[in-house]
Amino acid sequence: MIKVNLDYVLLDKHMSSKELAKEVGITPANLSILKTGKAKEIRFETLNKLCEVLDCQPGDILSFTSDEVSEH
């Protein structure tokens, strides 16, 4: 499972979601979908811009955790 850690990065960078959306060139609604983990995908272009604006690495924004739930 991919977890989105944008809230933590925003806190660390002292930036609001609204500011980030404007700098990246996406709508606040789309940023919210990404932040809450409801996005099904992210474009590399968007990820590049997020990393550029936040001066961070993709691994600072996204992390992977194994899902312990077994499927039958």
Image (cartoon, helix red, strand yellow):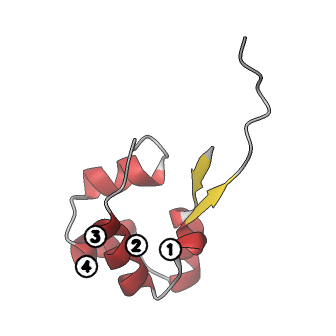
Residue at figure coordinates x 74%, y 44% from the top left: 66
User: Which residue bears the numbered disc 1?
Assistant: 10
Q: CA distance from mark 2 to mark 1?
A: 7 Å
Task: Note whether 43 is above or below 47 in the view shown.
Answer: above
Q: Amino acid at mark 4?
A: Glu
Q: Dot 4 surroundings within 10 Å: few (below 14), some, or many (20 or more)?
A: some
Between 47 and 18, the residue placed more toward the observer is: 47
What label sits on residue 16 in the rendered view?
2
- Residue at the front extreme? 72
Do residues under tags 2 and 4 come within 8 Å of each other at their CB atoms? no
Q: CA distance from mark 4 to mark 1?
A: 13 Å
Report the side of 19 relative to 1 (left or right). left
First in residue order: circle 1 vs circle 3? 1
Q: CA distance from mark 3 to mark 4?
A: 13 Å
Distance of mark 2 from mark 4, alpha carbons? 11 Å
Element carrying mark 3: helix
Q: Which residue is mark 4?
A: 23
Q: Amino acid at mark 3?
A: Glu
Q: What residue appears at the point 34 percent right and 66 percent down from the top-left corner? A: 44
Earlier in the chain: of badge 3 and badge 4, it is 4
SS state under label 1 = helix
Amino acid type of the residue tagged 2 in the rendering: Ser
Mark 3 and 2 residues: CB-CB less than 8 Å, in contact?
no
Number of residues whose C-alpha sits closer than 10 Å to that of mark 1, classed few (under 14), some (14–19) or many (20 or more): some
Answer left or right for 21 relative to 17.
left
Tell me which label, 3 or 2, sits earlier in the chain. Answer: 2
Q: Amino acid at mark 1?
A: Leu
* Location of residue 72 in the rendering, given as x and y in whole percent from the top left corner: 73, 11
Secondary structure of the residue carrying tag 4 is helix
